[in-house]
Image (tube, rainbow, N blue to C red):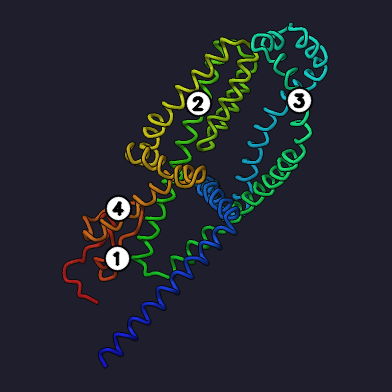
Amino acid sequence: METERRERVAVRIMLIAIALGLATLVAVELVLRVERVLVWMVIAVFFTTALYPAVDWVQGRARWVRRSLATLVVFVLVLVVLGGLLAVFAVPLARQGAALASQLPDMIAQARSGRGPVGDLLARTHALDLARQNQSRIQQFATGLGAPALNFLRGLATGIVAAITIFVLSYLAVLEGPKVVEGTLGLFSPARARRLRRVGRECASTVTGYITGNLIISVICGLLTYGVLKVFGVPFAGLIALFVGIADLIPLVGATLGAVVAGIAAFVHSVPAGIAVVVFFVLYQQVENHLLQPVVFARTVKLNPLTVLVAILLASELAGILGALLAIPVAGIIQVILRDIWANRRGPGPPSTVDGDAPAPAGDVHANDVPAGEVTASREPGTADR
């Protein structure tokens, strides 16, 4: 009997292990197939967390305003701001594009004869001689640009679909957020619901702090870039600095992309200006990655600077751009959850009125349900237990 029982237990363990392995494979395959949609949802969560307080503020300022109207107002303002930024880029680019098209034949003639800023640069770098020597290879390369151009158009179409999808997901999440939150918390006891609400509020504050810190760093990057370009007399310094600041919002590759654009514009203006801009961006990226980001995020996300740096390095190595995007908020959320678990295991602390929660009635709060700092109410003398 004992042998048969052990055999049955071994078979069950083996079946459970096989089932868990198959479930893991199915989960991994599912994630790989819907990876793009998951990325869109993650970005939508960021926008939702950033715009949720704004909608609450609009709704709180005027009690008669329904949440649907407040959400619509906030998202319309966001579209106006984004449209304004696009116009800031599009209008000067359209003007300069028209001017460039009219001057292009003369510029090509000057470049071929070695005159003008472009011709002088080509003559110094011997680019014309190199182009003449490799003319056949350049022609073959030009004929093979059809597939990359088609891939670029596909990527552009995918980006437009992604932007629309993220916008709609964020709008619906902000609009229906209170109903989802209240419905979910209604499944728990009042004490545990208060605890979950407080933890969720702190997690949302962590994500908002990350977004705020990222914006602060981008503003600093844009201002410093504007100063350097202005000192060396590079034209359109404000426009280039604005592009660099917006590009800096993108983890890992954003600052590099902005540096490439600013460097090209500076080299076209003059070689010393180009060298100075390249040196500036090399030094600035080191300062931003190892000093500015840890210090700013330590204040906005309430994380130790060493934790911020380690989280960015590990997450970017594991998951690339998406990992760099999620590293700091995920580390902050983990810190909030661990801090709550630790406080809950230590038992309730002294009564307080944190986050505006109402005092819990006597007998309704258990030591295992309320973390340290949660609002508690002491029994009045002579009150009997219910």
**Left/right of residue 146 with respect to residue 219 in the rendered view:** right
Count neighbours of disc 4 (C-alpha within 10 A) and say few if under 14, some if 14 to 19, many if 20 or more.
some
Disc 4 designates what residue? 339
- The amino acid marked with disc number 2 is Cys
Left or right relative to 288: residue 269 = right
Which residue: 42% across, 31% down? 289
Instruction: Examine the rendered structure and indicate whether residue 22 appears above or below residue 98.
Output: below
Q: Nearer the viewer, residue 328 or 106?
A: 106
Q: Earlier in the sequence, mark 2 or mark 4?
A: 2
Question: Residue at the location (68% across, 33% down)?
Answer: 86
Provide residue 297's location: percent of width, then percent of height.
Answer: 39, 37
The reply to whether the C-beta atoms of the residues labelled 1 and 2 are less than 8 Å apart is no
In front: mark 1 or mark 4? 4
Which one is nearer the viewer's eye here, 26 or 257?
26
Q: Amino acid at mark 1?
A: Asp
Task: Read off the residue under disc 2.
Answer: 221
Question: How far across and down, in percent of the image, does residue 296 sit?
Answer: 39, 33
Residue 66 seen in render: no
Residue 234: image quadrant is top right
Q: CA distance from mark 3 to mark 4?
A: 53 Å
Above or below — where is 198 with respect to 319?
below
Q: Which residue is mark 1?
A: 369
